[in-house]
Structures are given as C-alpha cells and as structure tokens.
Amino acid sequence: MSAHKLSVRVYYEDTDFSGLVYHASYLRFMERGRTEMLRDLGLMQRDLALSDAANALFFVVRRMEIDFRQPAHMDDLLSIETRLEAIGGASLTMCQAVRRGDALLAGARVTVALVSGGRPQRLPAPVREKFERLLIG
C-alpha cells in the first residue's frame, strides 16, 4: 500500500526556544496526517462521533513509538507520510514518517483503537472494508 502524504509547513509556534521543532509538535503533525488519511477514505471523525449520541465512536491513540532522527526548523516544508500496517478487531496500526525532502526526521508506529463510552468497539463493517481496500490497494 502506498503512503498517504500531507504537506505541513513549520511555523514559529511549532518550535522551542532553540529554534528547533518541539518534540510534541511532531505528534500534532502525525495526528493531522492520520486525520487527513481518514478524510480521504471518506471517514469523517466528526460523523463517527455524532452519528449516534448514545454510541458515539472515537479513534483514540492506544500506543505510539517514535524515533526522532533529525531536527526540523521554522519554515521547513515537511511531508507527513501515513501507511496502514494492520487492521485488528477494534484497532488500526499505522507507520508514519516525517520527512524534509528525502531526509527522514522522525518515524512512528501508532496503534489507534475505536472506542465508545470508554470501551473498545469492533470496527463497523463499512469502516473495516474501507481500510481493507486501503491495505490491499
């Protein structure tokens, strides 16, 4: 499966006092990458959450492992790459990369779980099918 790509510009607000991108900013960039991948699949997180107030569904980060390799700087144009790695009963595992050109700045493996009322929920069949097509295609 090819990676979903999102371009992100680094702004002053993304940096720390040293002028380098603050480590938590990478988490925000990766969140945007995952959200835009879902949007491109036709899955709007707001629709999942508001479709049935009693059974609102949310994707939440269950596990994240990140390797920081090189720093990014203010005004860099980054590419956030998101690739689906595995589909579980109530979870998705993705690999993400933050790149500046060909340089890998950070890489992560992220598992998100679908929950409702604080409890895991199996992926609904229409949602699972979209991810299965992505994994195959």
Image: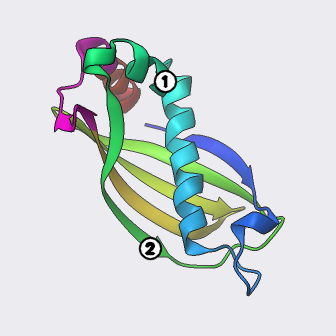
Residue 59 lies in quadrant: top left
Q: Nearer the viewer, residue 84 or 33?
A: 33
- Colouring rule applied to residues: rainbow
Q: Is residue 3 visible?
A: no
Q: Quadrant of the N terminus?
A: top left
| Amino acid carrying mark 1 in the image | Arg
* Residue annotated with mark 2: 67
Q: Quadrant of the C terminus?
A: top left
The stretch in magenta equals: 114-127
Which residue occupies the extreme right position in the image? 75
Count up the numbered dots: 2
Q: Which residue is located at x 48 percent, y 29 percent?
A: 38
Q: Which residue is located at x 25 percent, y 34 percent?
A: 115
Mark 1 surroundings: few (<14), some (14-19) or many (≥20) residues within 10 A:
few
Q: Is residue 67 visible?
A: yes
Which residue occupies the extreme front position in the image? 54
* Residue annotated with mark 1: 46
